Image: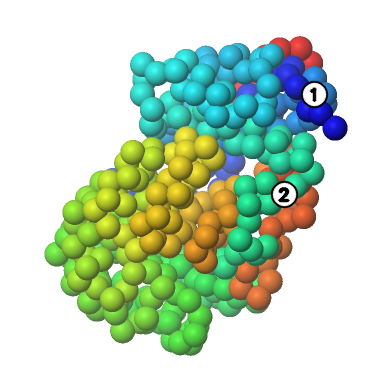
């Protein structure tokens, strides 16, 4: 059977505001750098081809940046109409050069990410494969831990209740936020959660970049006794040298990378051995095309992987990473999609549905604030 080239016939970009049930606070709120988060803004890309294949991708932003991502995508998306959606490498390069004067990182590539992810979703669906299988999976399920139950606005009692519910739902690890103005309060919360969980449940902490180098080292030493799976973002995201020194000084693994906005920025972390576990975020680094480049570099350097947020995408990417990874369980995005990801025995199962395996819900449509079409419907 020979291949018949297909063409992108139609493309919709839309933006939606997902409200959060409670205002969310991590250490950045307690240092006065950010206000509690009340919503997440999404950029969706939906692609349809002449042969009737479809793809869905998304990008997102927290607090600010959503309108800019949408505006940039609107400017460059038309270049895809009439193109063969299978040529993802070529199309990515075209999209990149269409917006080259505003750079190859941050908002510019986060806008492209939604399109790139939609192209991968489409390609996997055309092949009849879950995205993880299209990429070449190492496993059919990925270890998973929960973050959404352990924020700083929650009391110790709320966190331990959330943790029990999380573990009962088949999720294997618990992450809680640290970085309160009073370090002894952080230690009290970690001790209480460790005692509640027992010694065998994986526990992580996340300081969201709010410690200085001296505090991170002191806290890191205090935290060694809790046998943490990792300490996340102890320092400013761009302090590669500080992270490297900390990683060398502590037994507890250091994780970071979620705030970085390109492969080039991650390359510095990798080159300086700034972490044990790298935490890229596919929408933030410019999509799956970019994520795969950095995953190759990270694996080559011997790093473990725990992608940030957006489990609907990262489950597939983590399943295709050679070293045993983690995927971050966040229930926030559930209302946007009709499907639910299954968790069992501490792991998240790669869905058997082709592509990413998600479709936009009526609620996502109801939260849509603007949309634009290209090509012919
Ligand atoms: Mg984090």
Mark 2 is surrounded, within 10 Å at the Cα level, by few (under 14), some (14 to 19) or many (20 or more) other residues, namely many
Using the rendered view, name the quadrant where residue 341 is placed: bottom right
Q: Position of residue 162 (x, y in %)?
A: 56, 71
Q: Residue at x 46, y 68 (%)?
A: 175
Q: Residue at x 71, y 41 (%)?
A: 124
What is the quadrant of the N terminus in the image? top right
In the depicted structure, whether residue 80 falls above or below residue 339: above
Q: Position of residue 48 (x, y in %)?
A: 75, 25
Q: Is residue 295 left or right of residue 364?
A: left
Structural distance between the alpha carbons of marks 1 and 2: 22 Å
Q: Nearer the viewer, residue 22 or 167?
A: 167
Q: Nearer the viewer, mark 1 or mark 2?
A: 1
Q: Which residue is outermost to the front?
A: 1
Q: Dot 2: what SS?
A: loop
- Asked whether the viewer can see residue 140, the reply is yes
Using the rendered view, name the quadrant where residue 261 is placed: top left
Q: Which residue is outermost to the right?
A: 1
Q: Position of residue 64 (x, y in %)?
A: 42, 34
- Asked whether the viewer can see residue 66, the reply is no
Q: Which residue is mark 2?
A: 130
Q: Which mark is residue 4?
A: 1
Q: Nearer the viewer, residue 333 or 72?
A: 72
Q: Residue at x 34, y 69 (%)?
A: 253
In the depicted structure, whether residue 271 falls above or below residue 124: below
Ligand 1: does it lie within 8 Å of the C-beta at label 1?
Answer: no
- Colour basis: rainbow
Q: Is residue 375 left or right of residue 277?
A: right
First in sequence, mark 1 or 2: give its number. Answer: 1
Q: Position of residue 305 (x, y in %)?
A: 46, 59
Q: Dot 1: what SS?
A: loop
In the depicted structure, whether residue 276 falls above or below residue 345: above
């Amino acid at each position: 059977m020979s291949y018949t080239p297909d063409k992108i016939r139609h493309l919709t970009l839309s933006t939606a505001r997902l409200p959060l049930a409670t205002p969310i606070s991590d250490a950045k709120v307690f240092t006065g750098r950010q206000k509690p988060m009340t919503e997440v803004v999404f950029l969706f890309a939906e692609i349809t081809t002449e042969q009737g294949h479809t793809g869905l991708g998304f990008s997102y932003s927290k607090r600010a940046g959503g309108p800019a991502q949408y505006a940039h995508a609107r400017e460059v998306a038309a270049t895809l109409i009439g193109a063969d959606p299978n040529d993802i490498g070529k199309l990515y390069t075209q999209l990149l050069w269409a917006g080259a004067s505003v750079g190859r990182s941050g908002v510019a590539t986060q806008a492209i990410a939604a399109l790139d992810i939609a192209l991968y979703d489409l390609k996997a669906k055309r092949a009849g494969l879950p995205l993880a299988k299209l990429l070449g999976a190492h496993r059919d399920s990925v270890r998973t831990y929960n973050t959404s139950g352990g924020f700083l606005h929650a009391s110790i009692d709320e966190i331990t209740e959330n943790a029990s519910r999380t573990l009962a739902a088949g999720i294997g690890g618990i992450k809680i936020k640290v970085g309160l103005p009073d370090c002894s309060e952080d230690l009290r919360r970690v001790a209480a959660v460790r005692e509640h969980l027992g010694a065998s449940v994986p526990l992580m902490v996340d300081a969201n970049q709010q410690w200085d180098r001296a505090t991170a080292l002191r806290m890191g030493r205090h935290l060694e006794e809790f046998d943490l799976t990792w300490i996340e973002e102890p320092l400013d995201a761009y302090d590669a040298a500080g992270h490297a020194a900390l990683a060398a000084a502590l037994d507890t693994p250091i994780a970071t990378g979620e705030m970085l906005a390109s492969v080039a920025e991650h390359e510095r972390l990798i080159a300086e051995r700034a972490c044990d576990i790298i935490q890229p975020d596919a929408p933030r680094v410019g999509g799956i095309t970019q994520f795969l480049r950095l995953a190759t570099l990270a694996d080559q350097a011997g790093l473990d992987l725990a992608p940030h947020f957006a489990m609907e995408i990262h489950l597939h990417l983590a399943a295709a990473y050679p070293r045993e990874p983690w995927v971050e369980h966040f229930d926030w995005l559930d209302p946007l999609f009709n499907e639910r990801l299954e968790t069992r025995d501490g792991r998240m199962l790669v869905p058997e549905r082709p592509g990413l395996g998600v479709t936009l819900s009526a609620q996502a449509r109801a939260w849509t604030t603007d949309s634009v079409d290209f090509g012919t419907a």
